[in-house]
Amino acid sequence: MTYKNNRVTKVVALIAAAATTFIGVSTSQAATTTTSPIVKLALNAGQGFRAHYVEVQVDPASRALLPKSVLASGQLQIGVGALPSGFPPLVFTGTDQQTIVGSEPDLGRLIAAVLGLQPVITNYTFANMFVGVDSGRVDLALSNIGITEPRKAKYDFASYRTVEYAFEALRTNPWKFTGYESLANHTFAVAKGTNQELFLLGWQKKLQAEGKNFKIQYFPDSPSTYLALDSGRIDAIFSVNPSTVYDVKATRNAQYPTKVAGTFGGTGPNPFGFIGATTKKDNGEVAAYASAINYLIQNGQYAKWLDTYGLPAEAIPTSQVNPYGIPVPTV
């Protein structure tokens, strides 16, 4: 079946990326052997992103907060959870079918530069990324990980963005999210193991108690999810706002253009919650990561990073260690 539209072009590209990166459960991408004060943002990110260089100096105060074992290795082991097909603009495979690119790995490169370490970026499935943190193979996980109280029991976090979720529907679909009641009698796709899934399950439980219901469907990757949306098998995708906004923009001239059909969460001075740089609980590393992020905020590289990926609305004034968690429901 052939569709002559931007959606399928994107799907084919994602499938190709998946074929390139899906080797076992992870693929690694090491930097060069010497540290550099220059970080290139959006390297090989493709159309819609401006690749440019940012100068970053090592911050001795942040570096001094790292455990000696990390300093001795000379490397920062960074895990992202984008297999098999990625989720632009946050984490995806570049146009060279090799570079792991996006806002999350690029933040990892910036943090590593501040700490005077070489970034070694490994791409996992979202679930196996946490296994890497648990085992100590991953020092720092960056994959749009929402900070919640249950996760704080097992991991330490340094906040770096605020949280907002979004529903993506076909532009021709009149449905709009106006609260959990509006979900009744519809079908939604969501990724397993995410906070979005927990919210959907919580809302489903509330509706079932009221004698109503809706369907939740799971798909193995982004291409199959969007094919289900295009064919009408699902009404909307519940995902993170940055990826939703990106896809809406990417499909505006396609055969099946999409729209933001409602958001949940929020930014501003009293945000709904935070995205956090994630490390193993009590391993002594989180203070260094928070310090490095604050160094980037204070010296302007953070704002340039957000602008590169269209995320300035999710900026925070200060990175905090283990701030309050997103109020996910218990299901």
Image (cartoon, rainbow, N blue to C red):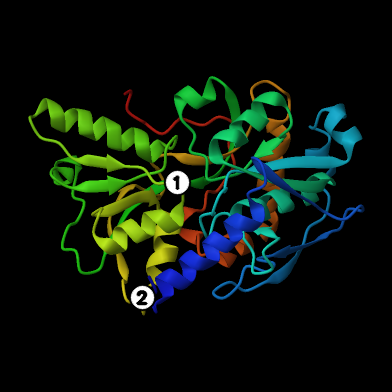
Can you identify the residue that label 1 sits on?
220
Q: Residue 71 at what x, y percent from top left?
A: 87, 35
Q: Is residue 92 above or below residue 118?
A: below
Q: Is residue 217 above or below residue 87?
A: above
Q: Nearer the viewer, residue 170 or 89?
A: 170
Q: Residue 153 at what x, y percent from top left?
A: 53, 19
Q: Residue 139 at what x, y percent from top left?
A: 72, 34
Left/right of residue 112 with respect to residue 309 in the rendered view: right
Q: Give the amino acid type for the residue marked by disc 1 in the picture.
A: Pro
Residue 297 in view here: no
Quarter the C terminus occupies: top left
Residue 129, quarter of the rendered image: top right
- Residue 73 numbered tag: none
Determine the residue positioned at 33% across, 23% down: 330
Q: Residue 169 at what x, y percent from top left?
A: 27, 60
Q: Earlier in the sequence, mark 1 or mark 2?
A: 1
Q: Give the amino acid type for the residue marked by disc 2 in the picture.
A: Arg
Q: Nearer the viewer, residue 107 or 137?
A: 137
Determine the residue positioned at 70% across, 47% down: 27
Q: Nearer the viewer, residue 159 or 259?
A: 259
Query: Is the C-beta separation of discs 1 and 2 under 8 Å?
Result: no
Residue 90, quarter of the rendered image: bottom right
Mark 2 Cα within 10 Å, few/some/many (few <14, many 20+)? some
Q: Name the element at disc 1.
A: loop
Q: Name the element at disc 2.
A: loop
Of badges 1 and 2, the one in the foreground is 1
Residue 125, quarter of the rendered image: top right
Left/right of residue 240 with respect to residue 209 in the rendered view: right
Determine the residue positioned at 47% across, 72% down: 9
Q: How many marks?
A: 2
Can you identify the residue that label 2 sits on?
252
Q: Is residue 231 above or below residue 266?
A: below
